[in-house]
């Protein structure tokens, strides 16, 4: 289509504007690969030219228009949450669209392409090793080109959200609020994940796994939190059991005030005001899981710079770990 915009955002402008300041939508950018920061405008970041232009399959420029339609629906919902500082008034249909939008955002960045490229490279290396040690070649393996990797990522973006969105819908949604005089980071891959429950020898960041926590900052002040409902339900039951035992006078002398507070906040959809130490945790996920760029309403990026100083590998860590080199 002739009216397809050349500049195509993988982080929506309406989200990035919530991290800008002043009438000119000034926003600060930290490049973790070069360890430098600079000012910009929200419309000039989080994009690449023809990012969703797929010349390999039938999608063509259709993806950019579908994303624009989704953003048109979701932008007022995000604005409502940010202006009210609450998710209490969120209607069911708004919650569903917000979950779909979060699912799409997770898939639409360079993170997916980097994952596909690194996976393809590892497989290609293992195939070459196999060919070198075997008298027979490996049939039907084709090393993917850059354009094919791009096309595959666009295909995933168009095909996966419908099946993955249930993982967001099943989570316990809450809203986090930054402490006074602090701001949430956002990055070029803003939907980040964490899981305290280890899986020995395997990754633990799958969005359907027990214990998974998903965070999506929607402004410098507010961040969406999607928590594993199975784990929350276990905590909720333990709180009930302890409260019942306390009533009967047989409860163990342990402090469950934080667990009670969390359950009350989730049940009443109360906005959770984040502690300073937890703020660093949330922002560190943006630094670690970003592809390259971190965005903020503040120019200093003290946390990001300190993380790179102590752990320089963060600047260029792989998306895929080659298990054959571990065991």
Image (cartoon, grey):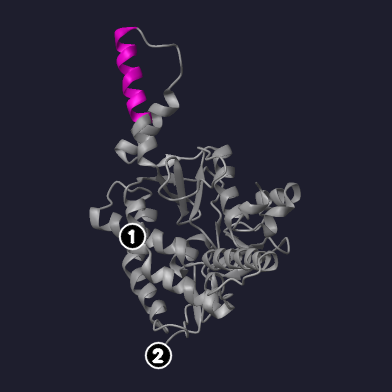
> Callout 2: helix, strand or loop?
loop
Q: Is residue 298 left or right of residue 263?
A: right
> Residue placed at 70% from the left, 67% from the top?
132
Tell me if residue 300 is in the magenta stretch.
Answer: no
Q: Is residue 62 left or right of residue 139?
A: left
Q: Which mark is residue 1?
A: 2
Task: Point out the residue furthest to the top here.
Answer: 249
Q: Is residue 229 left or right of residue 133?
A: left
Q: State the image coordinates of residue 90 (x, y, percent, origin top left).
A: 28, 52
Camera-nearest label, 1 or 2: 1
Task: Point out the residue furthest to the front here.
Answer: 135
**In-front residue for pair 148/191:** 148
Q: Residues within 10 Å of mark 1 (few under 14, many from 20)?
A: few
Q: Residues within 10 Å of mark 2 (few under 14, many from 20)?
A: few
Q: State the image coordinates of residue 271 (x, y, percent, origin top left).
A: 39, 42
**In-front residue for pair 168/256:** 168
Taking 244 as reference, is 50 above or below it? below
Q: CA distance from mark 1 to mark 2?
A: 29 Å
Q: Quadrant of residue 76?
A: bottom left
**In-front residue for pair 286/131:** 131
**In-front residue for pair 291/230:** 230
Q: Quadrant of residue 26?
A: bottom right
Q: Quadrant of the N terminus?
A: bottom left
- The residue indicated by pointer 1 is 163
Q: What residue span does the magenta drawing correspond to?
A: 235-249
Q: State the image coordinates of residue 29 (x, y, percent, origin top left).
A: 63, 64
Tell me if residue 242 is in the magenta stretch.
Answer: yes
Q: Quadrant of residue 160?
A: bottom left
> Callout 1: helix, strand or loop?
helix
Taking 99 as reference, is 127 above or below it? below
Taking 145 as reference, is 241 above or below it? above
């Amino acid at each position: 289509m002739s009216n397809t915009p050349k500049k195509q955002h993988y982080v929506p402008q309406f989200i990035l504007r919530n991290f800008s300041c002043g009438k000119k939508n000034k926003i600060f950018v930290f490049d973790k690969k070069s360890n430098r920061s600079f000012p910009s405008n929200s419309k000039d970041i989080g994009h690449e030219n023809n990012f969703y232009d797929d010349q390999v399959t039938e999608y063509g420029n259709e993806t950019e228009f579908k994303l624009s339609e989704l953003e048109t629906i979701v932008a007022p919902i995000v604005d409502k949450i940010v202006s009210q500082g609450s998710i209490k008034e969120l209607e069911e249909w708004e919650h569903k669209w917000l979950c779909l939008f979060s699912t799409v955002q997770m898939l639409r960045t360079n993170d997916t392409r980097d994952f596909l490229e690194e996976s393809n490279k590892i497989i290609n290396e293992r195939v070459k090793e196999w060919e070198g040690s075997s008298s027979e070649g490996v049939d039907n393996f084709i090393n993917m080109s850059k354009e094919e990797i791009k096309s595959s990522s666009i295909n995933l973006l168009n095909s996966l959200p419908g099946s993955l969105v249930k993982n967001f819908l099943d989570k316990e949604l809450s809203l986090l609020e930054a402490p006074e005089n602090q701001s949430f980071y956002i990055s070029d891959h803003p939907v980040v994940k964490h899981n305290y429950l280890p899986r020995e020898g395997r990754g633990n960041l799958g969005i359907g796994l027990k214990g998974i926590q998903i965070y999506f900052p929607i402004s410098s002040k507010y961040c969406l939190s999607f928590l594993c409902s199975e784990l929350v339900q276990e905590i909720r039951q333990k709180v009930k059991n302890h409260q019942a035992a306390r009533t009967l006078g047989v409860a163990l002398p342990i402090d469950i005030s934080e667990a009670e507070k969390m359950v009350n906040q989730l049940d009443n959809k109360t906005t959770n005001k984040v502690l300073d130490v937890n703020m660093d945790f949330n922002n560190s996920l943006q630094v670690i899981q970003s592809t390259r760029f971190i965005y903020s309403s503040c120019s200093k990026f003290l946390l990001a710079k300190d993380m790179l100083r102590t752990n320089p590998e963060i600047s260029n860590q792989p998306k895929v770990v080659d298990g054959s080199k571990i065991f």
